[in-house]
Amino acid sequence: MAGVPLIGSDCIGLREVLDHSPATMVPARNSQKLASAILTEMNKILDAPFSFKSISEKHSTQTKKVIDSFCLPVIDLSVQKDRKWELGTSSAWGGESAFQFVHNAIDWANRKKIAAIVTAPLAKESLQAAGHSFPGHTEMLSHYSNGARSVMMLAVDDLRATMVTLHVSLRQALESLTPELILEVMEITVSGLKNMGITDPILGIPGLNPHAGENRLFGDEEDIIIRPAMELARGKGIRCEGPFPPDTVFLEHRKGRFDAVVALYHDQALIPLKLFGFERAVNVTLGLPIIRTSPDHGTAFELAPQIAANPRSMIEAIKTAVKMANSSLFTADKVDS
């Protein structure tokens, strides 16, 4: 396995949306955990030139023997016998199928059968309609990886940000902020950056309020929550700067002042990064014993019947997973045969 990490994907097939053609998966030489019959049907709808080779779990590490780049190795889980799906729609059937694919991919990664997971967009409505209360992939990954504390990172080229709070209301996010929580995310961020090959990372920390509070004129959270967190981090050897005004912290990051921003809530990170490079953005889950990346866009049901969807973010997600598998603690050499 040295040199070509085996990347597992739930990306195409019984997922609710087919807004990525199978071509996006070829560069990673991955093993897809899908339903081959639906893949074949989508292949016809998209008029794509691909074929599929069914393989078993036992022979999953032999996918490098598939020489034809238009032939994709597929592990057919056949998780649901009765077909109850309609192209480009959300459904409980699709949500259950998506759940099963993700769950199996996590299991394989935890058992070191694969070096990383690349996931496609997940319709949270479908997932919850199927009876699964997870807000998204990140929470699923944490739950099925021994409850490991996970942190979402969004990366666009050399710009990166993690989030202290994620899929909660803004009110809940603000109420949950503590120095200890911020410190925990800073520690996970530093560890993740080191796994990406950044040996001595520097973190940029934004304020919560306009102008970072401006000497408490617009709020005191910078003094009572954020600065204490930074002092705790420095005591642990973490290099960090801030708190910066939230409206300029990413401009400083773009100048190369630090290696990542630790944002305090979801949109504080995602709005600027998506503006910088929506089509290139990659979601990386940090803090887990496994590697997981994904494109940073939604399911786009309206694009399911088309071949016009832009695969660039998916391609970047695959490249990032391969790079991390080759350079981090979770190397391809550790994948069991």
Image (tube, helix red, strand yellow):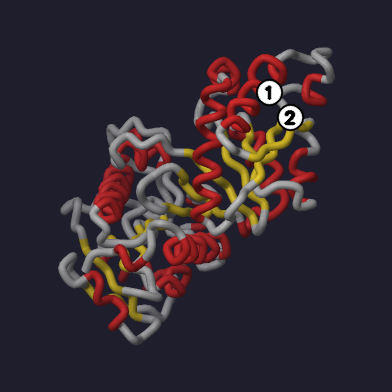
Q: Quadrant of residue 96?
A: top left
| Disc 1 packing (10 Å; few <14; some 14–19; many ≥20) | some
Q: Residue at x 45, y 59 (%)?
A: 328
282 left or right, relative to 146: right
Q: Is residue 305 visible?
A: no
Frontmost residue, 335 versus 247:
335
Q: Residue at x 64, y 55 (%)?
A: 156
Q: Are marks 1 and 2 in contact (CB under 8 Å)?
A: yes
Residue 1 coordinates in the image, percent (x, y): 31, 74
Q: Earlier in the sequence, mark 1 or mark 2?
A: 1
Residue topped by disc 2? 243
302 left or right, relative to 49: right
Q: Is residue 209 visible?
A: yes
Q: Which residue reaches farthest bottom?
A: 67
- Residue type beneath disc 2: Pro
Residue topped by disc 1? 227
- Residue type beneath disc 1: Arg
Label 1, secondary structure: give it: helix
Q: Residue at x 64, y 28 (%)?
A: 230
